[in-house]
Image (cartoon, rainbow, N blue to C red):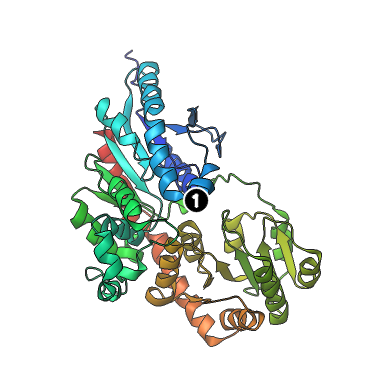
């Protein structure tokens, strides 16, 4: 009997941070269900070590992710992509030898654009995976075409709406915290003008971002696969951090939609004063709250919190948001958290830190109208009012209704015949041929 050819292998190259690794592992699981083999290439730090059916290959990291703070994002990414290219080519060469040339495609994070050179050298198809929203990806493309000098001088341009993508204006483009603008725009040209990729995957759905997706399709001239939200199509959502499950028991003791859940992601750092004001405001709101804080809290804060709150270092976020006791999510508005909240129909208080998060917050508040944004300095009276608006007021109830509408649309999009289901099918067809 003829030996069946081994399953086709897909090589995944995630950027080594929680917000990037998670959707990559979800994509891998979705592709395993479609009969592919998955190899994940990663550095020594921030590694995922085990997911059933995955093969993990470690390459020596020329630049540990811990250098990100020291160098700043632009220098870090430029240096990382220059120094890791050779060892990645060796790695692909070895994989091709070990697996009898059975590599169907390299799917790489847009920040890991060194992958493209190896794909070209070994004549392998490559697909980009953008782990941010489609609108953030649009911003990257727009930035890559900007002239730094002109943009900084021309204040009129900054208030203009970007290419019919209302309400997106030029001043929403994520540029702060990136160092000198000309260096950053140079990097944008590297990341966003990758000519030889065969397609781009985005963890979003057309019911959320149809105009941005149409813009990308037209602008890039390669297939765009919006196949999100990926986390609802797979059974496990791997975390680089250990999740404290005790919070689920705590939630079980509370009334439906009464708890405010607070988490600012794995990267956020808050000043002591802000933590203090939050603690007082939450206590004064008289609503129970579950708060994810990775740093140790001062004793004074722990005392204030102990009456109504529960503190964990990291939470099983999908389970928390799906819990009937949760009535609102106070979030930094990272894209994964945003999707997870919408999928469970939970309205949001937005406290973005970085520019990409500010962009998501703008859409949560002004486009989808499922959240409110906390502006300026955090102050206890404002915290109390925000929580009340979200949990107790009619305004919060209306946001919840809209959020539940999106929840139903998103769940429909990943079912048979839905837009995300079809996009995954299209991707699979491409990978098979």
* Residue 289: x %, y % from top left: 68, 70
Whether residue 327 is situated above or below residue 388 in the rendered picture: above
Q: Which one is in front, 427 or 118? A: 118
Which quarter of the rendering shows the C terminus? top left
Q: Can residue 204 be seen in this view?
A: yes
Which quarter of the rendering shows the N terminus? top left
Residue 54 shown left or right of residue 101 in the figure:
right
Q: Is mark 1 on a helix, strand or loop?
A: helix
* Residue 155: x %, y % from top left: 29, 74
Query: Label 1 belongs to which residue?
Result: 19
Whether residue 218 is situated above or below residue 193 in the rendered picture: below
Residue at 38% over, 62% down? 174
* Residue 340: x %, y % from top left: 50, 60
Residue 47 shown left or right of residue 114 in the figure:
right
Q: Can residue 234 be seen in this view?
A: no
Q: Which one is in front, 75 or 432? A: 75
């Amino acid at each position: 009997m003829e030996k069946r050819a081994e399953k086709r292998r897909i090589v995944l190259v995630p950027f080594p941070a929680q917000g990037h690794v998670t959707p990559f592992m979800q994509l891998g699981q979705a592709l395993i269900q479609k009969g592919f083999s998955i190899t994940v290439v990663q550095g020594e730090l921030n590694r995922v070590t085990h997911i059933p059916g995955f093969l993990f290959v470690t390459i020596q990291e020329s630049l540990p992710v811990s250098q990100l703070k020291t160098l700043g994002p632009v220098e870090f990414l430029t240096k990382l992509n220059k120094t890791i290219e050779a060892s990645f080519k060796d790695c692909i060469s070895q994989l091709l030898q070990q697996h009898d040339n059975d590599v169907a495609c390299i799917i790489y994070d847009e920040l890991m654009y060194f992958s493209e050179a190896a794909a070209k050298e070994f004549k392998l198809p490559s697909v980009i995976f953008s782990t941010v929203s489609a609108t953030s990806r649009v911003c990257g493309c727009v930035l890559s075409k900007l002239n730094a000098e002109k943009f900084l001088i021309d204040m009129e341009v900054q208030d203009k709406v970007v290419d019919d993508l209302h309400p997106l204006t030029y001043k929403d483009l994520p540029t702060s915290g990136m160092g000198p603008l000309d260096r950053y725009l140079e990097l944008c040209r590297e990341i966003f003008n990758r000519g030889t990729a065969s397609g781009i995957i985005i963890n979003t759905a057309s019911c959320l971002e149809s105009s941005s997706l149409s813009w990308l399709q037209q602008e890039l001239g390669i297939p765009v696969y919006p196949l999100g939200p990926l986390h609802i199509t797979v059974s496990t959502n791997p975390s680089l951090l250990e999740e404290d499950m005790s919070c689920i028991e705590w939630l079980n003791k509370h009334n439906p939609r009464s708890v405010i859940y607070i988490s600012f992601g794995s990267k956020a750092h808050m000043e002591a004063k802000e933590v203090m004001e939050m603690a007082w405001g939450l206590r004064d709101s008289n609503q129970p709250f579950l708060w994810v804080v990775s740093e140790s809290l001062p004793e004074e804060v722990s005392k204030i919190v102990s009456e109504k709150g529960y503190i964990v270092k990291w939470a099983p976020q999908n389970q928390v948001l799906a819990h009937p006791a949760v009535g609102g999510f106070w979030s930094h508005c990272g894209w994964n958290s945003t999707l997870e909240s919408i999928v469970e129909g939970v309205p949001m208080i937005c406290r973005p830190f970085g520019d990409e998060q500010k962009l998501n917050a703008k859409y949560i508040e002004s486009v989808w109208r499922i959240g409110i944004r906390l502006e300026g300095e955090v102050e206890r009276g404002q915290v109390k009012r925000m929580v009340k608006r979200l949990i107790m007021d009619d305004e919060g109830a209306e946001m919840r209704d809209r959020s539940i509408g999106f929840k139903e649309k998103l769940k429909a999009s990943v079912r048979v015949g839905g837009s995300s289901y079809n996009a995954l099918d299209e991707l699979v067809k491409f990978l098979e041929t």
